[in-house]
Amino acid sequence: MENSTLLPSNQVLIFDVESEYGHFRKFNTTTSPLTYSIPTRPAIAGLIGAILGIEREVSAENFREGVTPVAELFTKEKASFAVQIINPTKKVNIGFNLLDTEKTASSFFNVKQRTQIEFELLKNPKFRIYVSLRDSILFSTLVEKVQLNQAHFTPYLGLSQFTASTKFIRIVNVSKSQSAEFQEVLTAVNLNNADADNPIEFDYTVNSGFKYTSDTMPIEMQANRIVTEYSEVIIETSGKPIKVKSDNIFYLEDIGNIIFL
């Protein structure tokens, strides 16, 4: 079912983020963790929280006095995020030696207690992130930090060892598209924000080069890490635009169309 989207603001910050590796763990994988092809909406919220310097909890569900959790600061009513694939998706499997944390501290130094598990990783991921925030002061602070490349905490793509770099692109005004036809969209498409009966026009011609995939992804998450909304998201993994029919397409001048997650 298509939902009508209202933006928190008519201004959108655009910046790129990239790393050597990335991992956004799928919720339904355990022993051999698989990764989504793009950062989920909660992961983008965490990335922006790191840039702004918003502290995480000091222990489970325990935040310092005066700290607003990222999940509450960037709800769908207060923030809109979209993500575009810049580098075509490439996935590799790499083994990780995991520490034994169930015994004493000395077990950390016992090499026989290591457990090796293969992780599916994104190789050389690069994404373009689109951000609209209701809080104009927070938005201005975010813009300044991205422009000056002065993130408060080190940003990373999914796992802390995959440190990331960001690059300011521009700030643009955004307007809602009025077309009822299929339009090319640069970003991943949340199907809840597309036409319920005929959302995507797929190009299956042999030489088109399109590579479509879809995943059920978390969209909204509470501070206690309970997911309150999932949605199927369509991705074109080589970075090509997707033809979408939707009332929730937004046009960015001199850039193109996007849909927020």
Image: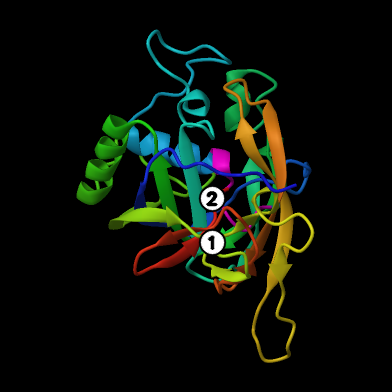
**Image quadrant assignment for residue 128:** bottom left
Q: Is residue 153 visible?
A: no
Residue range highlighted in magenta: 35-42
Kind of residue sitting beneath label 1 = Thr
Q: Nearer the viewer, residue 27 or 207?
A: 207
Disc sitting over residue 211 in the figure: none
Kind of residue sitting beneath label 2 = Phe
Q: Most prominent secondary structure in the magenta stretch?
A: loop
| Residue 138 part of the magenta segment | no
Residue lying at the far bottom in this picture: please name it: 207
Q: Nearer the viewer, residue 65 or 29?
A: 65
Image spot of residue 42 (x, y percent):
56, 38
- State which tag comes first along the sequence, 1 or 2: 1
Instruction: Determine the residue positioned at 35% across, 64% down.
Output: 253
User: What residue is shown with label 2?
Assistant: 260
Secondary structure beneath dot 1 equals loop
Q: Nearer the viewer, residue 183 or 25?
A: 183
Instruction: Determine the residue positioned at 62% across, 30% down.
Output: 221
Q: CA distance from mark 1 to mark 2?
A: 8 Å
Disc sitting over residue 187 in the figure: 1
Image spot of residue 234 (x, y percent):
68, 60
Q: Is residue 218 visible?
A: yes
Neighbor class of circle 2 (other Cα within 10 Å; few <14, some 14-19, many 20+) is many
Instruction: Determine the residue positioned at 52% across, 60% down.
Output: 178
Image spot of residue 216 (x, y percent):
74, 48
From this view, report whether residue 122 is shown above or below residue 217. below
Instruction: Determine the residue positioned at 37% across, 11% down.
Output: 66
